[in-house]
């Protein structure tokens, strides 16, 4: 039996609204046209789906059995149409953690085979990007994801990036070829915001007992590193592959025993998958495998418990 989707949609709207007038307004139809569509569907199926009484509209037993499948049918139709219409639409991806240059990881996908076109944007932080996802303003987000996530969102780990320490030339440890995180205990952590807004740095400071912190306005890396160069006890943490501006008197040193890792993830809405998000995720996972982005040894590396 082939169903007319217009009649199925008419029935579903009435069943969900429990009111012909409200359903007609939502569909942009007159009540008479809507009633005719429902009647045509009932005639096709050979059963009565809806009853009207003084309290409004109610489902018959047949209508209650038919409704879930009818809703699934409409959802499948809408996904198929959306996939066709959106095939060439860029994936709208907001990034956060701008000081750590999240677009570095996405930029390499622009010309990779099978990668969808990207339309990057900038979110303030994870809660702001999560809100944009929930509202449907963007397709995905990319940055460090830590719980709790709002309902309806999910994520996948893409990259674990080693973190270096940057020191000014006058720092007592500036000449070391490598450093352990606990050697920074008596130093001052420079940050682009208050510590309670920087989950990774807060967890690092707690784990390695960094008691002194200094927050400066987030005006970019160059001002942050210039302030660092003037502080003989200061240090900054940055992912190892971040391209840093040339600031005299500042050097990057690898951290070892353990090496802190910064976790980058893709975040998107749960539910019916988007072809663009599926393609982006597949490209990221493929690239992560090729570049060995997810290597992790708990005896050698450190991740915050949330990661």
Image: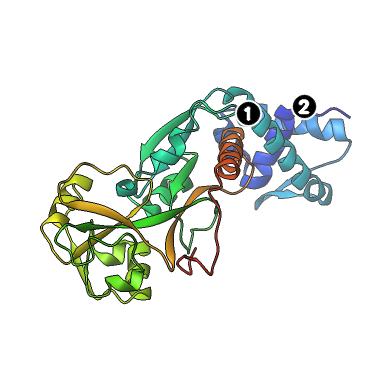
Position of 102 compared to 69: left or right?
left
Mark 1: secondary structure? helix
Nearest to the observer: residue 275 or residue 225: 225
Give me the disc on residue 83: 1
- Mark nearest the camera among 2 and 1 is 1
Nearest to the observer: residue 246 or residue 8: 246
Q: Position of residue 101 (x, y in %)?
A: 35, 44
Residue under the point 75% across and 49% down:
59
Residue occupied by mark 2: 4
Residue under the point 48% across and 69% down:
305
**Residue 67, image quadrant:** top right
Q: In the displayed structure, would residue 126 be above or below residue 108?
A: below
Q: Residues within 10 Å of mark 2 (few under 14, many from 20)?
A: few
The answer to whether any part of residue 117 appears in the image is yes
Position of 200 compared to 266: left or right?
left
In contact (CB < 8 Å): disc 2 and disc 1: no
Mark 2: secondary structure? loop
């Amino acid at each position: 039996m082939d169903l007319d989707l217009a009649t199925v949609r008419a029935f579903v709207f009435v069943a969900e609204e429990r009111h012909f007038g409200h359903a007609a307004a939502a569909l942009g139809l007159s009540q008479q046209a809507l009633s005719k569509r429902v009647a045509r569907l009932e005639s096709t199926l050979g059963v009565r789906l809806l009853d009207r009484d003084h309290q409004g509209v109610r489902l018959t037993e047949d209508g209650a059995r038919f409704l879930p499948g009818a809703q699934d049918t409409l959802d499948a139709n809408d996904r198929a149409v959306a996939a066709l219409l959106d095939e060439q639409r860029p994936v709208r991806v907001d990034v956060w953690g701008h000081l750590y240059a999240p677009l570095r990881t996405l930029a390499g996908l622009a010309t990779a085979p099978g990668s969808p076109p990207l339309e990057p944007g900038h979110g303030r932080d994870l809660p702001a990007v999560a809100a944009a996802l929930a509202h449907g303003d963007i397709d995905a987000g990319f940055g460090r994801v830590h719980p709790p996530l709002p309902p309806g969102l999910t994520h996948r780990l893409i990259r674990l990036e080693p973190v270096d320490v940057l020191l000014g030339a006058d720092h007592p440890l500036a000449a070391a070829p490598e450093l352990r995180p606990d050697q920074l205990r008596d130093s001052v952590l420079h940050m682009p915001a208050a510590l309670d807004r920087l989950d990774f740095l807060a967890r690092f400071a707690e784990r390695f007992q960094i008691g002194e912190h200094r927050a400066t306005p987030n005006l970019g890396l160059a001002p942050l590193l210039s302030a660092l160069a003037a502080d003989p006890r200061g240090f900054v943490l940055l992912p190892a592959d971040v391209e840093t501006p040339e600031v005299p008197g500042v050097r990057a040193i690898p951290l070892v025993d353990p090496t802190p890792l910064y976790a980058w993830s893709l975040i998107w809405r749960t539910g019916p998958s988007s072809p663009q998000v599926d393609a982006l995720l597949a490209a990221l996972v493929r690239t992560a495998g090729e570049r060995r982005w997810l290597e992790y040894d708990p005896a050698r590396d450190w991740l915050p418990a949330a990661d």
